[in-house]
């Protein structure tokens, strides 16, 4: 498709580029273009933060392998993002600042000056905390600059022909109440319960958000029936993990 050609041309014109790679759809498309146009002059930097699930880590590694990308994985701890665990409104800014700072350091060590992320034009405006962190650290966003929407990026992703199953992921902290401190045990509980839900119901995409001891379950509109059909078993399994009750969101969730 012509948008893919346009993206590759843009990446080629930029030259040596380091990509903030999460294993998600946007950064995968950006990295694929970098690998295609700059096979010897690209770098993928994966920030392994405590807010990720093991599923996300495996997905990122598998995609990078399929693309044949030059990948560096950097482990960041809570000490690298002080304040994130308080889950306040500045959480995303602190987290993105840590990720982009790690990207900058890794890129500099390898002789890369240009760093990019996978933001697209469908993402919210410049007031987004992550966008502010990117601007402060000089991170460019080729997909956004070219005006590519989420739909366009999805079409380009589909054209890559990857065999790795990539699901839309959001930060694990979004599953927990705002302004409430969380730790590793809380993140691992969410991860464990979401895996149970997928295994029991067969849904591919799930978000479990805990509010006042109740697990609110979100999936795509076409998969809600799977949660409803297995509601009793889901309730029992989650209760064994300390979740008092469940509530299935009937509107559906698309990302």
Image: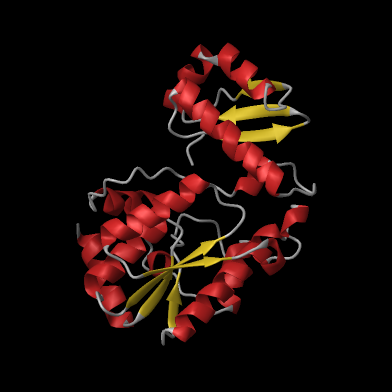
* Residue 78 x/y as whole percent: 69, 61
Q: Is residue 12 above or below residue 246?
A: below
x then y, percent, for residue 22: 46, 58
Q: Give the camera-side residue of 95 and 26.
A: 95
User: Which residue is at the front of the view, 231 or 76?
Assistant: 76
Q: Determine if residue 224 is in view.
A: no
Residue at image point 39% right, 56% down: 61
Please tell me which residue lies in front, 140 or 96. 96
Figure quadrant of residue 19? bottom left
Task: Say left or right for 247 vs 152.
Answer: right
Q: Quadrant of the N terminus?
A: bottom left
User: Above or below — where is 144 with respect to 201?
Assistant: below
Above or below: residue 223 compared with residue 115: above
Residue 35 in view (yes/no): yes
**Residue at 65% across, 28% down:** 216
- State left or right for residue 22 relative to residue 188: left
Corner quadrant of residue 90: bottom right
Q: Position of residue 49 (x, y in %)?
A: 58, 59
- Find residue 18 and report its horizontal and vertical position in percent: 41, 75
Q: Is residue 111 left or right of residue 79?
A: left
């Amino acid at each position: 498709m012509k948008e893919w050609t346009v993206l590759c041309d843009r990446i080629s014109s930029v030259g040596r580029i380091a990509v903030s790679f999460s294993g998600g759809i946007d950064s995968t498309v950006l990295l694929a273009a970098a690998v295609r146009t700059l096979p010897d002059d690209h770098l993928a930097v994966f920030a392994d933060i405590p807010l990720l699930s093991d599923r996300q880590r495996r997905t990122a590694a598998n995609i990078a392998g399929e693309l044949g990308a030059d990948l560096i994985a950097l482990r960041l701890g809570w000490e690298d993002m002080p304040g994130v665990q308080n889950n306040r409104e500045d959480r995303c800014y602190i987290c993105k600042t840590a990720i982009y700072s790690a990207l900058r350091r890794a890129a500099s060590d390898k002789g890369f000056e240009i760093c990019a992320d996978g933001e697209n034009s469908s993402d919210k405006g410049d007031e987004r905390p992550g966008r502010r962190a990117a601007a402060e650290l000089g991170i460019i966003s080729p997909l956004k600059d070219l005006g590519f929407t989420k739909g366009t990026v999805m079409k380009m992703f589909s054209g890559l022909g990857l065999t790795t199953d990539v699901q839309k992921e959001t930060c694990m902290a979004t599953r927990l109440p705002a302004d409430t401190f969380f730790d590793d045990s809380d993140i691992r509980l969410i991860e464990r319960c979401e895996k149970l839900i997928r295994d029991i119901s067969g849904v591919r995409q799930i978000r479990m958000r805990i509010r006042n001891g109740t697990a609110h379950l979100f999936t795509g509109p076409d998969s809600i029936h799977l949660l409803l059909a297995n509601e009793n078993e889901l309730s029992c399994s989650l209760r064994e993990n300390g979740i008092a009750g469940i509530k299935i969101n009937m509107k559906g969730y698309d990302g």
